[in-house]
Amino acid sequence: MSERSERTGGAAAQPHRREGASGRVLRFRFDGREYEGLEGDTLASALLANGVRAVASSIKFGRPRGVYAAGSEEPNALVQIEEPFPEPMLQATTVELYDGLLATGLPGQGRLADRPDPARYDAVHAHCDVLVVGAGPAGIAAAGVAARAGARVILADERPEPGGSLLGTAETLDGRPGREWAAEEVAALAALPEVRVLRRTTVLGHYDDNHVIAVERRTNHLGAAAPADVARERVWRIRAGRVVLATGGHERFVAFAGNDLPGVMLAGAARTYANHYRVLPGRRAVVFTTNDSAYAAVLDLADAGVEIAAIADVRQAPGAAWAARCAERGIEILTRHVVTAAKGEGEVSSVEVAPRSETPRSETQGGGGGAREIPADLLLVSGGWTPVVHLFSQAGGTLRYDEELGAFTPGETRQAVEAAGFARGVRTLRACLEDGAEAGRRALAAAGFAVPSEPAVPSGPAVPSGPALPSETTVPSAGEEPAAAPAEHLWLVEAPGDGGDYGTHFVDLQRDVTVGEVLRAVGAGLTSVEHVKRYTTAGTAHDQGKTSGLLTGGVVAHALGVDVAELGTTTFRAPYTPVSFAALAGRDRGPLHDPVRVTAMHEWHVARGALFENVGQWKRPWYYPRRGEGPGEDMEAAVLRECRAAREDVAAMDASTLGKIDVVGPDAAVLLDRLYTNMMSTLKVGSIRYGVMCRPDGMVFDDGTVIRLADDRFLVTTTTGNAAAVLDWMEEWLQTEWPDLRVHCTSVTEQWATVALVGPRSRQVLARLAPGLAVDNDSFPFMTWRDAEVAGIEARVCRISFSGELAYEINVSSWSGLALWEAVMASGEVTPYGTETMHVLRAEKGFPIVGQDTDGTVTPQDLGMEWIVSKKKADFVGKRSFARADTARPDRKHLVGLLPEDPGVLLPEGAHLVETSALPEPPVPTLGFVTSSYRSAALGRAFALALVSGGRERVGERLYAPVGADLVPVTVTSHVLYDPEGARRDG
């Protein structure tokens, strides 16, 4: 390849690249084919340079779709990046080209990645006096005024380089090309000490008190060359004193037959491709316009080498200066004409134009006869421009309809926010610059800064130059901007040849919504644009209706015979553009999203070969298989061994993960009485009581123990996985229903390490570890606690049993947890056991676990715990629900035990239960389901717990559990299968 080809890619490699284009050649693959582009391209501009017209297909009809716009308003060209990491649903117009890019076109939906994302994402907080959104002419002027007065300024723009609308034009400022002027002015701004310029940063949402969320794409454009230590995307959470929205506008299209074909493009986008990317989007173009802005695009494209076949202008006449310039180039202007159809197989090959009807309505037109078909491969459309008011509206601003512009512009807002430039309907470049500077002055004044008399550079060698408001001599190179002729507002071109159903008149290209669907919605009685949006899905895709929202409203207004101003707009919601879940998560993913919590004894468990179970966020020892010669113990053997030790000898479990909440205050007992079903205020200091919490509907929410430490202090324990939920529950009631209660609740779960010492010999082991503690039954009865030194460590020892055996829970500071555990293990033949053994032991005793033996529809009475529902308390959460007829039904599901007829059969948890030994035809009525199922060393067999309809009345009955193709017979029994008298509790 020649030197020139290496630099530009060569005409043969990029047949639609303009002469004189330069830049490093980048190679990429799209839909399996190799292409070349230039540094600075987007994927869209590179594809257009290579003559690729169809980029994607539509989601509903599968119609080919091409590049329609040049920025984040793109409705068509959706792609999936495959390398270096799969990312779906990206707009080709916003994907910056990099060497090695691999992408495919999408049919309106993508594929999620099948592997973990290796990139980093982060988030930062920032504060400023003035935030300027948009680095176009108005935004640069506003930021310049504010920065030079000493304000802290953030200037954010979604593009890689500043300039806004100047990037796509041939206009000049200060005798420099607009693109060059913008780059130099923003570079000077960035050099100021209190200015931060954020490129590739899209402001997604504007919330209360000027809290603004933005996403910066930091390394997406680098592909595989992205540094591993730099975050791919960063979320900015900005708190601004004042916000200036210089967000510009989006060009909109018109609904006519075939307006979605590849080769149909917004006129302003084509101008951008020709000027900024030096790419010709077509060879021969027809232009369809309702306003003068398309003429600037026509002249630039003609100068670039595009043949302009004709301009179809719906108006009586364009601006005289524009018409004269077109006449100089021999361009035909067809006034009072409309495009009735774009035609072609898979892409535009010709355009049908026709005179307007003689008695037109402003919002809809039909061909008045004399249609003409013009060969062309490009159709440029300009149906007017819509200010970008999304953020202004999100900030609570009202909108007003601008009759001259034919669009909604900012009205009033309660926040410290204002729009500038075209974002508030200012039309000309000179006016946008002046308006931006004035917005900067207003922001300064509101922020408490002295306002300069003019936006000039302060004197002094330490202050960089520019930007200042351009003088009268630095208006665009054409001198005074040509006087504009009034625009007309056209939404729909009627085309009888389309079958009358408007099947190819699209109003939302991404959602495949046609005029016909909008008319059907209106015909169904929908008169609100919000309702039509939901009926048709128009405006709900990735582009959020940037090009289609007002067009849809215009068609609805036409169908209803009302003004667009009267109809209004749909609600503008964040995010302004799509944002990846990875960016929103930031570094809060994996262990940081759901932190892995371990106890003080964790390393001991690891060293002894424990396998772990995830319980909530905690890693809990599941069981401890012995490793000997051969394969060692499996789970069943290990658990049976651990169970025997707890029932026959002595065993210990790390119970540190139990939730612990300190409840302190003069009204602490009152709070607990209201939250638990049983009485807690009568509990004596030094004693412990088991309790159950219910939701207002009477269903069990959590259970645990309440330890009274003092008259005004309790320690509440909860299930491991429910600790945060219980604390939140307490705070919700305190803050919303009982704010008069003098109580403070504090999580102390991680401050305590707990060892459960269980089994007939546990009293002997504790006596050796705590020689100063009287451990006999009379001195230390069940459900009491004592302070003592255990293994030389200050401890709180509780007589609590979740196994039915003699047991103690020894609580020490988490710093001393490992020392206590090691002392217990060194005291004799103590067997460590894990959560699986704990489950077997408690299930043998019929102790339910909330969340396993309950499913949110279970009352304490259903669990056989009528005794825990106080008859003395006037009220507690859930009390009234126990008087409902539904909670007293005899056929409610009760917790019962199940004994399989074959003692070796282990029922699967979740298995349903039926009455008959043969299944009837579906649907099969079920009586309930298995909640817990284990093998028991103490019972010498397998057993289960289940929730069974009318279960307590079915004790002794035979039921059946469908397991695969078999029906396993089981006998219903009491849920307490081991030591029902409780004789083993006291040793």
Image: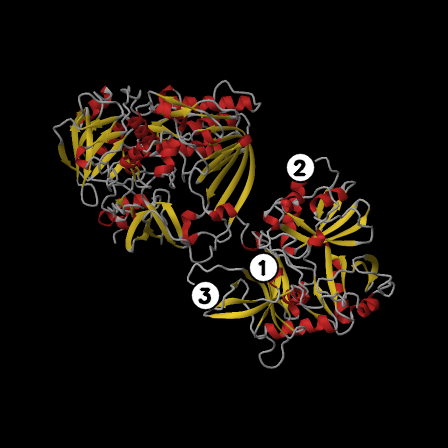
Up-down relation of residue 563 to residue 949 (above or below): above
Q: Residue at x 76, y 54 (%)?
A: 689
Of marks 2 and 3, the one in the foreground: 3
Which is nearer the N-term, disc 2 or disc 3? 2
Q: Is residue 78 above or below residue 475?
A: below
What SS does tag 1 mark? strand
In the rendered structure, find residue 737 and report the number of the disc placed on it.
Answer: 2
Q: Residue at x 43, y 40 (%)?
A: 200
Amino acid type, callout 2: Glu
Spatial distance from mark 3 to mark 1, Cα to Cα? 20 Å
Horizontal and vertical percent position of residue 5: 26, 49
Label 2: element kind = loop
Q: Amino acid at mark 1?
A: Leu
The answer to whether residue 334 is above or below residue 119 is above
Whole-angstrom CA distance, mark 1 to mark 2, is: 34 Å
Note whether 939 is above or below 283 in the view shown: below
At 69% from the left and 73% from the top, the residue drawn is 644
Specify the farthest residue to the bottom.
629
Is 453 left, or right, of 656 in this rendering? left
Near mark 3 (Cα within 10 A), the count class, few <14, some 14-19 or many ≥20, is: some
Q: Which residue is labeled 1 in the image?
A: 947
Residue name at image x 66 percent, y 69 percent:
607
